[in-house]
Amino acid sequence: MTVTRARLGALQIGSSPEGTAATLARILAREAAIAEARLDLLVMPEALLGGYPRGADFGTRVGYRTPPGREAFLAYWEQAIDLDGPEVAALCDLARRTATAMVVGAIERAGGTLYCVALLIGEDGQLVARHRKLMPTAAERLVWGQGDGKVLPTLSTRAGLAGAAICWENYMPGLRQSLHARGVTLWCAPTVDDRDMWHISMRHIAYELRSFVITACQYQPAATEALGQPVTLRDRAEDAPMLRGGSCIVSPLGEVLAGPLYGEEGLVVAEVDPADVVRARFDLDITGHYARPDVFGTPA
């Protein structure tokens, strides 16, 4: 059956300073709003469960590690989730109860290594897959491992085929090309990038891929410490939010359909026509008539 209308959402919310259990409780408290929105797909921010350690240096300099830094890593590791843990089970139950497919950002632990991941959960409450961020950015490499390139998973939803690119993975042309070639029409972008340039990038990527883009960013009020370490807010006023958000939904022609939401938590929702993807690809399909495999090779 062809779906003529679909509802897409981005939940702008931040990790609780009280830890992962408190963050999960904040997500579950949104159940009524999620159910009322009748969403076909909901995207939540990067590192929502487990937290994004903005401002933390884990006591590290090139060639040096410190005991306090190791303690900070231990504290961070303890807030990470396991795929078979209660947090994932609770999210799956939430998806099932609200009949909503979800892409959720989290920090996954595997032995002594942490990964920034996107959990792909079907509307039936099944964990379909998880995508590990391929390339942690800058100092993220101190605490996150690299995901492998075996699989870039997709999630089938009532609204279309969804794929996930976490934060600056969106700036990897090969990754965009690969997921596009798999038929993705719903581009999910969990992030903690709240700059104006991110909003510009989301519009560009939607226009390039001719797909709907749903990006969800954390909102964090002004803070004075992260993982017990002082935070210097060099690039913003002292009373400005630590992360100001910016979640939004963009059409396949780069038009902003909902958001961007700044300065508060909230649910951003847009009702869309999935056929707009085909209409938009009439004149640009980067793995179709615009692919030119004779020049560039066959897309992965």
Image (cartoon, rainbow, N blue to C red):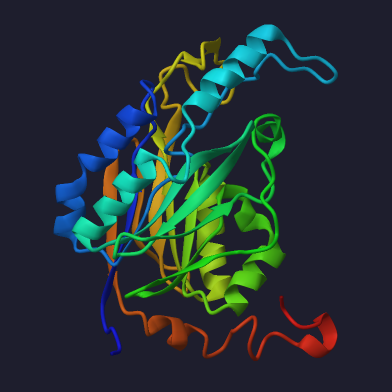
Residue at (39, 24) in percent of width and height: 19
Looking at the image, is 161 positioned above or below residue 269? below
Figure quadrant of the N terminus = bottom left
Specify the quadrant that holds the C terminus: bottom right
- State the image coordinates of residue 28 (x, y, percent, origin top left): 24, 41
Residue 175, by quadrant, is: bottom right
Q: Residue 143: x and y, percent? A: 65, 30
**83 left or right of 221?**
right
Q: Residue 46: in sight, yes or no?
A: no
Q: Is residue 181 above or below residue 86?
A: below
Identity of the residue drawn at 69% across and 45% down:
146
Residue 248: percent from left, percent from top: 39, 55
Q: Please tell me whether residue 70 is drawn above or below residue 83 in the rendered image.
A: above
Left or right: 110 with respect to 148? left
Residue at 85% over, 18% down: 63
Q: Position of residue 148 (x, y in %)?
A: 69, 54
Q: Residue furthest top?
A: 67
Report if residue 249 is visible in the image. Answer: yes
Q: Residue at x 55, y 51 (%)?
A: 166
Q: Nearer the viewer, residue 99 or 178?
A: 99
Numbered marks: total: 0
Horizontal placement of 111 versus 120: left or right?
A: right
Quadrant assignment, res 14: top left
- Relative to 121, say whether 238 is above or below: above
